[in-house]
Image (tube, helix red, strand yellow):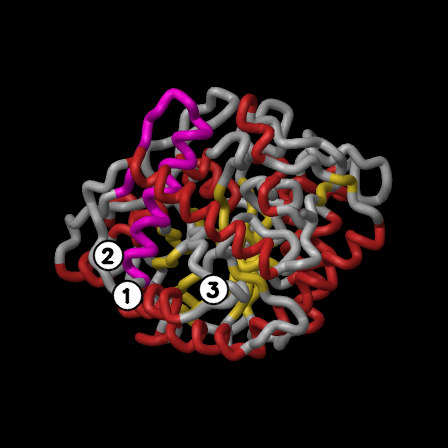
Amino acid sequence: MTNDIFAAFSLPSGKTLKNRLVKGAMEENLANAKQLPDETLFNLYQKWAEGGVGLIITGNIMVDAMAMTGPGGMALEEDTDLAPFATLAQKAKRNNTRVWMQINHPGRQVFKKMGGKVLSPSNVALDLGKHSRLFGQPKAMTEEEIQDVIQRFTETALLAEKAGFDGVEVHAAHGYLLAQFLSPLVNQRTDQWGGSLENRARLLIEIITAIRKSCAKDFSVAVKLNSADFQRGGFDVDDAIAVVKMLEPLHVDVVELSGGSYEAPAMQGHTADDRTLAREAYFLEFASKIAQQSHIPIMTTGGIKRLPVAQKVLESGVDLVGMATALAYNPDLPNHWQQVPGMVSMTPQVGWKDKTLSGMANMALVKRQLRRLGKGKPVKLNASAFISVVLDQILAAKLTKRYRRNMPHTTK
């Protein structure tokens, strides 16, 4: 195994990545009124492709336009116009870059103002203290709704392949629907979809199996999984190892390990169970442990912004290095590292007392940079966290109104 970040990497399904650096998924909220990508996103993805990563993973694209993680998101369903997605794939594949579409369903993590479907394995609401009221009350899913979700993930993967994407990443982390099924705290079902870990993982396994059957053999299928939820009594590293073992017979190309949820935003460096995360490569300890026990290639994302840290990830036995925020602030970082190995990308760290507001501020700062890059403007390194949150809330309100106006069948 090589520790060279810029060495090519062959995936189990047959395709090759030109290097080990991956642009991890970030929520952009830059889609147009039809929930489709247009010039802003085309520009942004072209910039990342030209910046030198080997693989780009899109911001999460919803399998159901009635269940969105936030306003301004993209959705890809059976009757969606594929042309804009084909253009997005084309822009992202410049410079010999691969591109995967991250496909997702938010489950209960739907803002109340958005309306639409708020589904979950059980009717357990998000617990964010005084901020809990921002989210809708989830409804326990029926068997018919579970089968519909399996069909939607499969259909979206097929459409991604048709549009020219090299693969999909199924999002089963960060507290979204598939992570909700995996969580013993959220999934309180007593049927075949709940109880034992095998039952709680059943929905993820069924979805991966269906996608693998429907798409070409060399179409990459990856899974984003929490190394842990970082909540007492929640999904933990031993559960993650067991789920990775369940995925091994399904010819999965990569498992990307992250962590946390809205309730414990470990992906931003904050936990809810008092465990301390590393200042960079938050989940490396967990990823390394899992990599030693599985033949599936492992990737980890979370706080990486320096080349020595990226190299440490490879040295620990992890195959791919995911970066997100660092590439929002410096989309050319991989190219720069080849010329100036000591370059460090800026990443914001808002340390307000209220962890929920801190998480919102970090996301608002990143999304502000993504908007600037998409419009052809330089990043704003000294952006105020407070002003960024205010601007993000104003924009979110406008986009929410637009979403509800264009979705007449949304709950009003």
Q: Is residue 35 visible?
A: yes
Residue for badge 1? 52
Q: Do the CB atoms of the residues marked 2 and 1 lie less than 8 Å apart? A: yes
Residue for badge 2? 333
Spatial separation of the CA atoms under disc 2 and disc 1: 8 Å
Give the mark nearer the N terminus: 2 vs 1.
1
Disc 2 residue crowd, few under 14, some 14–19, many 20+, Cα 10 Å: many
Marks 3 and 1: which is nearer the front?
Answer: 3
* In this picture, residue 107 sits left or right of residue 190: left
Residue for badge 3? 32
Please name the amino acid that badge 1 sits on.
Gly
Q: Position of residue 319 (x, y in %)?
A: 42, 54
Spatial separation of the CA atoms under disc 3 and disc 1: 27 Å
Q: Secondary structure at mark 1?
A: loop
Q: Which residues are magenta?
A: 347-374
Name the mark on residue 298.
Answer: none
Q: Secondary structure at mark 3?
A: loop
Q: Do the CB atoms of the residues marked 2 and 3 lie less than 8 Å apart? A: no
Disc 1 residue crowd, few under 14, some 14–19, many 20+, Cα 10 Å: many
Nearer to the camera, 326 or 295: 326
Which residue shows up at 34% across the image and 58% down it? 21
Please name the amino acid that badge 3 sits on.
Asn
Q: Position of residue 226 (x, y in %)?
A: 55, 41
Q: Is residue 370 magenta?
A: yes
* In this picture, residue 50 sits left or right of residue 397: left
Disc count in the image?
Answer: 3
Q: Quadrant of residue 216?
A: bottom right
* In this picture, residue 21 sits left or right of residue 173: left
